[in-house]
Amino acid sequence: MKAIGLEVAPAAGLEALARQGMQDARPVELIVVDMLRRAVLTGLLEAGQLLRQDELATNFGVSRMPVRVALRQLESEGLVRHLPRRGFVVATLTPQEIDEIYEIRALLEGHAMRLAVPQLAEDRLRRLERLLAAGKQQKDPLHLLEAREKFYRELYEAAGRTRLVRLIMQLRAEVAPYLLAQQMPASTESHAELLAICRRRDGHAAEEFMRTHLRRVAAMLRDLVTEDRKPKGGGGRTRPSTK
């Protein structure tokens, strides 16, 4: 992640986000949660950045209470952390933590695939096809990420394991800012291959596909994060393709 350790929030960007968000008719607490989540996922609030509640409240044009509620919600999602004597900061992940998250994801998501895929009804398969098609139309990385998460939630919910799905989606959210920052969109071709496996209702093949896919992404993301944590010298580097 870039610019780790920033201490001041980019006020102009947050205020612009607030102008869009406050047009929503939902309760202010839900709006602030969504705005803060979007700010973290897009890198507007960067990894390691201190989140001062009074500044965020001013930028969003709300009181401190909905900001405090939003920060606690994002803490439960793994997107921010509360540090003693400092307060809330945007969460950072080490290469070792990325390995751990993907090891757990491989176990949980592989298990969810094995349970869900044989249970896929035709109407759910059609919804998955529509979600995949919608994702292909997205040009904005955040919208692509959101489409991808909807696809997997729809798929895993066929397993009928509410707690399992909740744990999976939380772990996926923890690495989402890194996937966006490292410019690692998912390949639509791999999702099409997965959907073909789903149409065959082959749970074991889906499980193996997902575990192999997650191992590959974990290795790529770990290498990129390791490189970003090195002291910067002259010259740049070329990112490997994630297609």
Image (tube, rainbow, N blue to C red):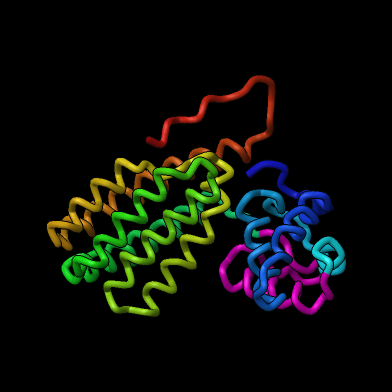
Residue at the image position 80 percent from the left and 64 percent from the top = 60
Residue at the image position 37 percent from the left and 35 percent from the top = 243
Residue at the image position 53 percent from the left and 39 percent from the top = 183
| Looking at the image, residue 138 lies above or below residue 15 | above
Is 75 included in the stretch rendered in magenta?
yes
Q: Quadrant of the N terminus?
A: top right
Residue at the image position 22 percent from the left and 71 percent from the top = 115
Q: Quadrant of residue 217?
A: top left
Indicate the position of residue 185 as horizontal and vertical percent values. Answer: 46, 43
| Looking at the image, residue 186 lies above or below residue 240 | below
Q: Quadrant of residue 36?
A: bottom right
Is 89 included in the stretch rendered in magenta?
yes
Question: What residue occupies the far top of the structure in this picture?
Answer: 235
Indicate the position of residue 214 as horizontal and vertical percent values. Answer: 35, 51
- Relative to 153, 190 lies left or right: left
- Relative to 35, 76 lies left or right: left
Report the label total: 0
**Looking at the image, which is closer to me, 30 or 118?**
30
Which range of residues does the magenta coloring cover? 62-90
Indicate the position of residue 171 as horizontal and vertical percent values. Answer: 47, 64
Indicate the position of residue 141 as horizontal and vertical percent values. Answer: 53, 45
Q: Quadrant of residue 57?
A: bottom right
